[in-house]
Amino acid sequence: MSVASVSAPAAGTPHVTALSDWIAACQGRFEQFVQTCLASEEREPRRLHAAMRYAVLNGGKRVRPLLVYAAGEFSSAPDAALDAIAAAVELVHAYSLVHDDMPCMDDDVLRRGKPTVHVAFDEATAMLTGDALQAEAFGILARAPVAPEICVALIRELAQASGTAGMCGGQAIDLAAVGRAMSAAELETMHRMKTGALLRASVMMGITAGGATARERAALERYAEAIGLAFQIVDDLLDTVATSAELGKTAGKDLRQSKPTYVSVLGAEAARRWAERLRTEAHEALSGLGPQVQAATARLKQLADLIVQRRS
Amino acid sequence: MSVASVSAPAAGTPHVTALSDWIAACQGRFEQFVQTCLASEEREPRRLHAAMRYAVLNGGKRVRPLLVYAAGEFSSAPDAALDAIAAAVELVHAYSLVHDDMPCMDDDVLRRGKPTVHVAFDEATAMLTGDALQAEAFGILARAPVAPEICVALIRELAQASGTAGMCGGQAIDLAAVGRAMSAAELETMHRMKTGALLRASVMMGITAGGATARERAALERYAEAIGLAFQIVDDLLDTVATSAELGKTAGKDLRQSKPTYVSVLGAEAARRWAERLRTEAHEALSGLGPQVQAATARLKQLADLIVQRRS
């Protein structure tokens, strides 16, 4: 994809500066595109459109879109398809945050340093905002400029990752877990569904939109599974050590809500080591793939590093 | 579709008894199919799967599936495609009811004669139930046994009907309307979006799954618009005259919630006349179509009658 050309690293020699340029280019591209996916707040129903824009256009890190773009580099997928996929997964992510933050769920008032949607607007609007963002996500995919059979495959992947076998299912297990002990294995299942499924789908949909051999697809699947879980372990770690200002959301709430986390179940040291091991797994999954995908795998490895080493 | 053969009326001479047989056959077929779309409550996460089944398998009238099947007769769409479409639109309808009934929206405790999902389970589960049902609706369509380009068209229609230009948008206008005066034109816009869009999509998706000429499609569109609006006018009328036991949901709540309705804006008599006019419009839209679709148009006209003349 074209954003890569801004700072494509020489094969095998990725640099951190190149990564930050690439991220900035992807984010810029994404912000521009996702704007066009959301109706103007001048259009009726204004309050709903305003809340949807508020929920999405809020300076998020765009981790999922970055994964889509990096996987799309790997599969040589067309830019326009990747934009649509990136927007769809980010809208699903955004809707889940809006609903998660509501009083009947996590009851949180702060998200990315701003009042959550139900605080800035109202609960009913927050509910509809999430509902409409999900519909929009599937609508964006259904209008993606790809062959119909690819389009259908993408929609199937997103539905699978969002439903009871993925994100919603993980959240239901999370709800049931409040205040009770959970084994590391149960916690892993929950987080592979709750957070991992959509991160994994981001990678795999970027691959689906282009071309990959079965061996490459299997390697990417292993990579995606590893970073999906690593992301959540690091989230749990950050929740205990970072401040609300650093995170842009309420810190320390897992403990206050008596939610089992990797830190409470394993302890911070073991959790940190596990995240590190998953980072290595993600790297190893991609090693031994052909030279023609070397630049793309280097980028994916950098993103694995970023996910594990981030500070917010 | 095969269920029609149970009681296909002689062309041009539909009978009410034939209709009730046809409805029973469609409903039987639908109930059997939709069961298979929802995970067993024996599977984790059990509470979420149980709530989803509770929300969907509740003896609803299945108006939207009936419209899908009748439109599918018109377009000679394959049965299996119609099952998938019927399930998808009904799941979207079911999710909207679950979210609508929640305390932050209509705060209703009774639906189809049973406690609403957030009462029978809890609010967080109700939220996730709606979210997961929406994802499942798109997943079902993405797995429908139709050509990929038809599949994509169906998903586009459902996303359009559910999002801010349709159902969610209509609900947002509804929220903004509480306690303030609304013109008949504003009310019409709101209801064409809130209720009409999904009813319209049920008809049009049934057509998309099969074949129809541009002239036929335009006729069906006029039909679908008319019945979509008529349905809501009759709902408003029933809310004022029927009891909660008859409706299976809380009666008289529009008035208590100071919501503008066709009855409050136009008066019951004018609302009844308007519904009757829309029924005639629906019939007229279908007249003059070729003899090969006469049985199917007779069925669609019967459904228009049913929608306007129903008592609950």
Image (cartoon, coloured by chain):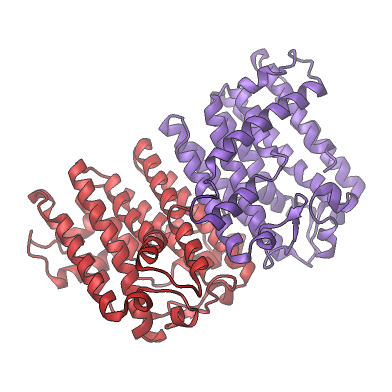
Chain colours: A red, B purple
Q: Is residue A8 left or right of residue B95?
A: left
State whether residue B80 appears in this view. yes
Q: Is residue A267 left or right of residue B101?
A: left
- Quadrant assignment for the C terminus of chain A: bottom left
Res A64 → quadrant: bottom left
Q: Is residue A279 left or right of residue A262?
A: left
User: Number of labelled discs?
Assistant: 0
Q: Image point 47% across, 48% down: which residue?
A: A139
Q: Image point 63% across, 23% down: which residue?
A: B74
Q: Is residue B206 left or right of residue B145?
A: right
Residue A199 locus on image (x, y percent):
34, 59
Q: Nearer the viewer, residue B144 or B56?
A: B56
Residue A75 locus on image (x, y percent):
22, 48
Q: Image point 45% across, 61% down: which residue?
A: A170
Residue A109 locus on image (x, y percent):
53, 79
Q: Nearer the viewer, residue B147 or A184?
A: A184
Residue B32 locus on image (x, y percent):
61, 34
